Amino acid sequence: MKFHLPLFTVLFVFFSSATLYGQQNYSGTIIDSQTKEPLFGAYVFLKDGQGETLSSSYTDFDGKFQVKKPGLNEFLVELSFIGYQTYQEMVKAPEGNNLGTFELVSDGQEMDVFEFSADALTGEVRGDTVAFNANAFKTRPQADADELVRKMPGVVIQNGVIEVQGEEVMEVLVDGRPFFGDNPAAALKNLPAQVVLKIEFLDQKSDEARLTGFDDGETTKTINIITKPGMRAGRFGKFYGGYGTDNNYIAGGNMNFFNEAQRLSILGLSNNINQQNFGEDELGNIEGDDSRRGGNELAVGELPGITNTNAVGVNFSDEYQDEKLKVTGNYLFNDRENVLTRTSSREYILPNDSLQIYQEDRNNQTRTQSHRMSARIDYNINERHALILRPRIGLDYRKSTNIRDARNLFDTNTPISSNINTTTSERQSLNFRNSLNYRYNFTKEGRALSTYVYTSTYDSDSNSDLVAVNENYQTGNIDSLIQFRNNLYSSFYFSSGVSYFEPISERSRLRIGYRLSNNASDTDQQVEIQDAETDMIRLDSALSNRFENQYMTHRGRLGYSYNSEKLSIYSTVSYESASIDSDRLFPGFENTQRKFSNVIPRVVVNYQLGEFSNMRVDYNTDTDAPSIRQLQDVISNANPLQISNGNPDLVQEYSHRLFTRFRKINPETNRSLMFFLYGNIRNNYIGNETFVAAKDTLIQKDVLLNQGGQYTRPVNLDNYYVFRLYGSYGFPLKFMKSNLNINSSYTVRNRPGIINGQENFNTNTTFSQGLNLSSNINESIDFNLSTRGNFSSVSSSLQQDLDNNYYTHRTRADLFWNFLGGIFVGTSVNHQVYTGLGEDFDRSVMLVNLDLGYRIPPSNKTEIKLTVFDLLNQNVSIDRNVTDVYIEDERTQVLRQFFMLSITYNLRRFGGYDMAL
């Protein structure tokens, strides 16, 4: 009896609480008056006679809701849903708990009940999902979805990267289905705002979590676009073309065929004004920022400089077998010609308060061609069996010519050495990845078995020719180098795991799993040197290398998950055994083996603080192995003034990450509050050890490093950490019909390194303050104002008196005004301020673009526009990079002033009828 009484007591309290909870709430259902389909996300308010809200809720996917009883015999029921007329009725408290079924009437139909006008509700918080109503944000008629999303609280879109309240968006769904793979910018840019009903920002769970229902804590920041019911079947798109001064041009368009679940989208693009992906502004990225991003399935990494692009893309999705089988697919072809002209200045931080400067002028011409294909197949075979299959393939070709003029200096007037070199290179590569997740449900609810298999192969063949002339100003020596390099690289990665899930209560489950992975890679590099006097060609064994590497891990896992209406907890502890086995086959055989074992815990807690607020805490640990490039002991002298080498003695990194987030949105006041705290500490961080030569030095007794040159190799270091605090607050300014969002962030990054045998810590501290103001007036007047100031301070442990404080400020103002019939004017003003970067880089830049256009009535589908780019002819690209041993400033050539005349045609056809704009 002693052992069963506590359990009985707990169960009694639990069921009593559940019964009491049900008695304290009203339930009901909301459906469409015509189709009788349930309405998901409709708002429910219970109010007193004076209109004061007593309790509120929203409907689930089945149109059902539960709302707290107001404790009155008579109260007002108010129901609201975007695209439907607001419902309001005084009701008497029923004897039971069911308020019944309510039917909402879509806009345009007659309604017998009392109507009233109110502000559109901005949004809501549902667990890890933040939803915003599209009609609460006014945009111009021809706007794309990215213009709509940009107006929402905490959203920043820059250089094709979308951030929602400080977190980068990695995927876009349309009505819950993938749209253009992992390229959010392309998805938003090619979907008109006119078809959008609601925007959801959510933490998308992993494939395994969606199959099994067991939250493993793995999430991806995702945007889900819910379209208007009447616009899920039709044809819509946009076609444009323009020509301007300096032979600048652009042509492209998109066409979408939607028929409920069956959807086909086709994109095309050709231009010479820097639009490299489908997700950018139609008339180019003329700011020329080097975002250094890439890797999306339907995107290519942005190239700095000036680029000519030709591209074609296709997206397809459909459902079969009564929605059991869902298929999506993407294809992209991208052909680019890029010219990069860049000047950089790098200041090395040396011991004994000494400095050394490295300056470089670079001109690079590159031709790239890329094919990207991906698919996703979700198949719910039956109640027991389900799987997700995701094949992806990429084929790339690159050819470039790089001319570099570089020099090392004691100060701006005292040169040490210089190098002028020309490198021509060519590379082709093939990458194939495939993942399969399978789930089996047992007869007992919650009991399941899941397995996954992931494979990835990568093969590349590259060659390059280097011609260089080196000069030592201290000795007067001049020498030359002619070099031919060929590199074959291949890798195969395999990972497979199995997990068993067992329910231990109504709300909690246990997970037991095992994972095996192996990453095998092989590189074969042959470098030949041509003697300048005899023209004899010989193999250089110091630069040639044949290397094989295997990294294998075994990981056992025990996890626990608990879910209730307000609280969800996921915790896991894993034991990992890993090994590195590396063989250098040439020059000379050498075997390196390393073994590691680690305990890897993780805890994720989500708590619903109230109806409209949520908190998430995520503590995560993980390991990261060194790459084959970091491990192989072979010298690279692509730039003879800066040579590098691998390190076969590297061990894996171990990282600790903490992420805490709080969000609150009040749909009645249209106010939103959000903040997050992020921290990352890495043990055995793979940093760099740099040697700056005080005189001409032979590296490994064979490769010459001129005086002032730098030799770098990776090493394991401690005391790497990152800390970031971010907060945003959004609220409406009713007096000017606009929304204001204020955001602040504070970031500290400490990066260790070794220079000339002494450890150095570069600490970069940045404080940012931003403000975004977006109009909500009407479709004829649309403006957005954003401004952000960044103050950064860089300190060095080797030179504590070093002053490297700098400030950057960017302000952007966009205005659209349809002031007379179809005549409109639009302008975009970008003001950039750089101070503290040095005399050659400090400046204030005003980048102004101006549009003057006319929309042809009565449909307004055709638009003729004259555009002036960089009206004041001040465009410039400046960037600062802070590493463990140096601080670098870069200036890159960008597009300058030109004029362009363009024509755009918008197609909107839904329900068999053309729609005017």
Image (cartoon, grey):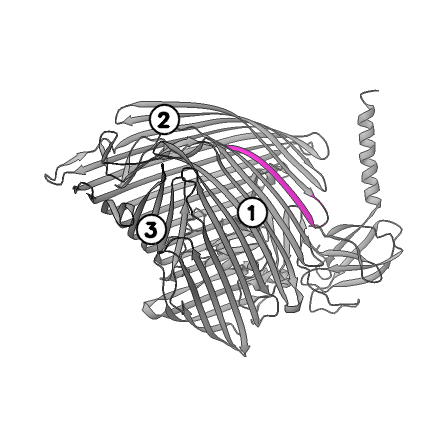
Residue 278: name its quadrant.
bottom left
Q: Which residue is mark 2?
A: 582
Q: Is residue 402 above or below residue 851?
A: above
| Mark before the other along the chain sequence, 3 or 2 | 3
Q: Which residue is mark 3?
A: 344
Q: Is residue 379 visible?
A: yes
**Discs 3/2, front:** 3
Give me the disc on residue 221. 1
Residue 31: give x, y in percent of width and height: 73, 57
Q: Is residue 649 above or below residue 59?
A: above
Q: Is residue 856 above or below residue 132?
A: below
624 within the magenta span: no
Badge 3 marks a residue whose secondary structure is: strand
| Mark before the other along the chain sequence, 2 or 1 | 1
Q: Which residues are magenta?
A: 608-622
Question: How far apart in space, not on screen, are marks 3 and 2 (Cα)?
Answer: 37 Å
Label 3: few (<14), some or many (≥20) within 10 Å? some
What kind of residue is marked 3? Answer: Ser
Residue 1: give x, y in percent of width and height: 84, 20
Question: How far apart in space, not on screen, are marks 3 and 1 (Cα)?
Answer: 35 Å
Badge 2 marks a residue whose secondary structure is: strand
Residue lying at 82% horizontally and 38% vertically, measured from the top left: 17
Disc 3 + disc 2, Cβ < 8 Å:
no
Residue 546: name its quadrant.
top left
